[in-house]
């Protein structure tokens, strides 16, 4: 059983204040790789990032900015003292959309099969004209949410009370880290609304980062507990490959693709009725070779009475982790079963929020957390979970939902490239999975699953407003 004395609620930690707070002007120290140039304005020399979407000209002693147009939100503005970090900024517009995301092929595992995904995309606009975007993936079988409940939640979110008008980027980040999801009576796990919170937090974080001319990296440093192991400088990362449940030949081809593409880690979905998992793993191991790190995900498929037998039948093929072997309702049985399975256990569907995580640590239910930004409520809560896992001696996978668009891929990349010692990394499958993607850049990982840090501003990607319009099924705004 794991020790519990080190478990601290993230809100208590935040009350103590952040451990490392980079100040304005320390961009180079936290590894922001974007181009920077110095402009002579009316006031003394100031440093203003010059990302591509912004074109600046001097006019009458002040710098005018052509603010980009995207997502139906546009504006022009003047670089005022507010954009340089003084004065206050306030949210003046919020828009949320139901977006249909077509997939290139059916993604199938033991719980579900999907040919498309319906995602939530939120855009936030500040009174300075700065705009940010975020995404959430409401899944009824994960956090209990639907697009309808997410819309309802966003209608009633009390942003005025919770955010007010921050006068600095630090203040905005601190308030976002404490952004409270509207309470719901029948929600003992505290996870209902996590996808909506993720989309909203992402949109606001990007808007404030753009508004105050600061980087997402600075926000991550401020939000993360020290134990999360946040790197000051982002580095190259490697994503895992994944083999979903398909026919024999399609799976064989998928395994060969993984090998030829040079993946060092591959996840295999198991537990689908009618499939012989020991045969499948034998086949995959033969194709992928002995050195490939193979892990399995049962997506809650195994009954408690079968878990030991099923897991041990797969041990000879050397899986390094077994993700969510039993339904969430039966997860406590893992306290007794886990040491006998012969494969380290990772919680996914049973790891949606702080309450789940503390329970898992206290009862000794798991060896690893699967942290997914949308499932876990966004950047701040996810960093808190990563910190708890590391403090408790557990491993961490930064995962993703099938059907995430490039927005969540970008947010995942911003986190992944700054977190040291991630055991596994999933995501950025964009070009391989999505038939439509509402961002302009292609940030799909490259050979071997390798991917570089994204350069700013904001998440490091630009929304493609025309594609987003075509994908939009429904929207609301204020
Ligand atoms: Mg899973």
Image (cartoon, rainbow, N blue to C red):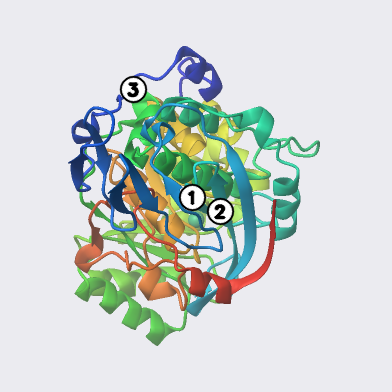
Residue underneath mark 2: 123
Query: For the point 52% across and 51% down, which residue is it?
Result: 324
Is the Cβ of the residue at disc 2 closer than 8 Å to that at disc 1?
Answer: yes
- Left or right of 140? Residue 229 is left
- Answer few, some or many: residues within 10 Å of disc 1's Cα (few below 14, many 20 plus, some between 14 and 19): many
Q: What element carries label 1?
A: strand
Real-space CA distance between mark 2 and mark 3, rounded to the nearest whole angstrom: 27 Å
Q: Is mark 3 on a helix, strand or loop?
A: loop
Q: Tell me which numbered mark, 1 or 3, is placed earlier along the sequence.
A: 3
Real-space CA distance between mark 1 and mark 3, rounded to the nearest whole angstrom: 22 Å
Q: Where, by quadrant of the figure, is residue 312 drawn?
A: bottom left
Outermost residue toward the front?
Answer: 60
Q: Tell me which numbered mark, 2 or 3, is placed earlier along the sequence.
A: 3
Residue underneath mark 3: 21
Instruction: Residue 50: give x, y in percent of width and height.
Output: 26, 49
Residue underneath mark 1: 132
């Amino acid at each position: 059983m794991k020790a519990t004395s080190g478990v601290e609620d993230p809100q208590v930690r935040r009350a103590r204040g952040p451990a490392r707070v980079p100040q304005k002007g320390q961009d180079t120290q936290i590894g922001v790789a974007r181009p920077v140039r110095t402009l002579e304005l009316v006031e003394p020399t100031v440093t203003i990032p010059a990302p591509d979407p912004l074109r600046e000209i001097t006019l009458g002693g002040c710098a005018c900015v052509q603010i980009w147009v995207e997502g139906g939100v546009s504006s022009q503005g003047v670089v005022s003292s507010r954009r340089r970090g003084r004065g206050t900024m306030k949210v003046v517009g919020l828009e949320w959309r139901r977006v249909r995301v077509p997939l290139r092929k059916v993604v199938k595992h033991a719980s579900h099969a999907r040919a498309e995904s319906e995602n939530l995309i939120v855009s936030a606009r500040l009174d300075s004209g700065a705009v940010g975007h975020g995404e959430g993936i409401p899944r009824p079988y994960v956090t209990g949410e639907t697009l309808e409940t997410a819309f309802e939640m966003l209608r009633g979110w009390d942003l005025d009370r919770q955010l007010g008008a921050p006068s600095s980027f630090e203040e905005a980040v601190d308030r976002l880290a404490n952004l409270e999801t509207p309470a719901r009576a029948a929600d003992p796990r505290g996870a209902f609304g996590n996808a909506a919170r993720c989309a909203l937090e992402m949109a606001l974080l990007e808007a404030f980062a753009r508004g105050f001319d600061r980087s997402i990296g600075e926000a991550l440093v401020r939000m993360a507990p020290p134990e999360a192991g946040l790197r000051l400088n982002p580095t190259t990362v490697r994503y895992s490959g994944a083999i979903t449940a398909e026919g024999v030949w399609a799976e064989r081809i998928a395994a060969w693709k993984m090998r030829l593409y040079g993946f060092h880690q591959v996840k295999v979905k198991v537990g689908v009725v009618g499939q012989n998992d020991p045969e499948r793993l034998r086949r995959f191991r033969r194709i992928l070779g002995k050195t490939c790190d193979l892990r399995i995900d049962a997506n809650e498929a195994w009954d408690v009475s079968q878990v030991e037998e099923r897991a041990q039948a797969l041990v000879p093929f050397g899986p390094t982790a077994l993700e969510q072997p039993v339904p969430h309702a039966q997860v406590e049985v893992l306290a007794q079963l886990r040491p006998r399975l012969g494969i380290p256990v990772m919680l996914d569907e049973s790891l949606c929020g702080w309450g789940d995580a503390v329970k898992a640590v206290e009862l000794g239910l798991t060896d690893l957390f699967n942290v997914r930004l949308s499932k876990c409520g966004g950047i701040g809560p996810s960093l808190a979970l990563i910190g708890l896992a590391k403090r408790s001696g557990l491993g961490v996978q930064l995962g993703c939902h099938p059907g995430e668009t490039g927005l969540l891929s970008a947010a995942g990349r911003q986190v992944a490239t700054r977190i040291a010692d991630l055991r596994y990394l999933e995501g950025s499958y964009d070009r391989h999975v999505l038939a439509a993607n509402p961002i302009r850049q292609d940030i799909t990982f490259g050979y071997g699953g390798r991917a570089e840090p994204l350069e700013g501003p904001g998440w490091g990607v630009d929304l493609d407003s025309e594609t987003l319009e075509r994908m939009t099924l429904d929207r609301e705004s204020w």
